[in-house]
Amino acid sequence: MSSESWTQYAEYARRLDAVRAEELARTAGMRASVAEMSSHADELQARLNGQGQMMTTLAGTLRLRRPKLMPIAPEGFVEPATDLSRVAAVIDRGDLESRRASDRGYYPVLLPKSSALVRSVVVYGVAALVVLLLQGLAFLHAHQNTNGFTVLFVYPLIGFVLGFIVLQVGSRTRIAQPPQPVGRVRPGQKPPKPDGPRTRLGLVMCFGVGPAALLVVLATSLNSK
């Protein structure tokens, strides 16, 4: 073998070794990437299973219909890395929404972000306006059969009872008793009861709106003379 042929053979051998090393590195990188994605998929599957159990428990706690967790077959081409990132984002969003739903379970159904005082003022205020409207119509169309006891007592009583029922139903929470902050309740001390509707305020508003309006009308008529 001539020296020129030996030189070409050695060059081809070096090129073959370089190609083989490059292919081995690429194959090793692919195996590492596949192993990493497989491990990530297993972690997401574990999180998804735990999230499903948590949502089922949360639905029972909130007295909601329990979700049907069924797998959905992917459609079209699947890109593992991109789809795993999307699944992780969906799981994170599910955890966030579950925490929000759990927090909302401690709030009343009616005006959840308002205090009991504000809720009572709104409900009894609407009831008092309806009572005042009925009383005004009764006095405007007064005749011999108009009963003052019905106008001044029965109407306010009906408005108060309806407002009380609305507050009782609307003040309920899906979770019975919110957890007390650490350090707020001493050992052996009973936790404070949830703030309820203001019944005295409702009585004053419903039974006092008619006389108050009557006094305003009388004062206005006296000042006009």
Image (cartoon, helix red, strand yellow):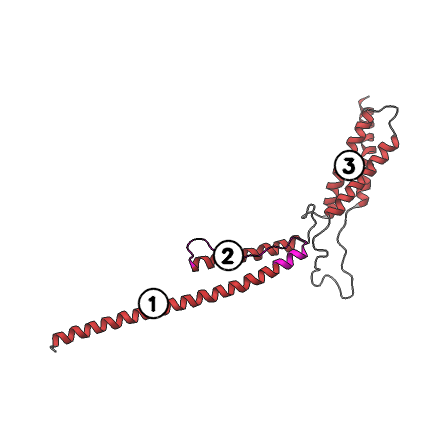
Identify the element where label 1 is drawn: helix
Residue 179 lies, with reference to residue 12, above or below; the image says above
Q: Which three-letter amino acid code belongs to the residue tagged 1?
A: Arg
Question: Could you tell me which secondary element the residue under label 2 belongs to?
Answer: helix
Name the residue: 51% across, 65% down: 43
Q: Is residue 58 left or right of residue 170?
A: left
First in sequence: mark 1 vs mark 3: 1
Q: Who's the residue at 39% across and 68% down the image?
A: 31
Toward which corner of the image does residue 78 lie, by quadrant? bottom left
For label 3, the residue is 128
Mark 1 lies on residue: 26
In this orientation, does residue 205 appear? no
Residue 60 in view, yes or no: yes
Residue found 85% across the figure and 33% down from its top: 152
> Alpha carbon of mark 2 to alpha carbon of mark 3: how far?
50 Å
* Residue range corresponding to the magenta coloring: 55-79
**Residue 8 coordinates in the image, percent (x, y):** 16, 72
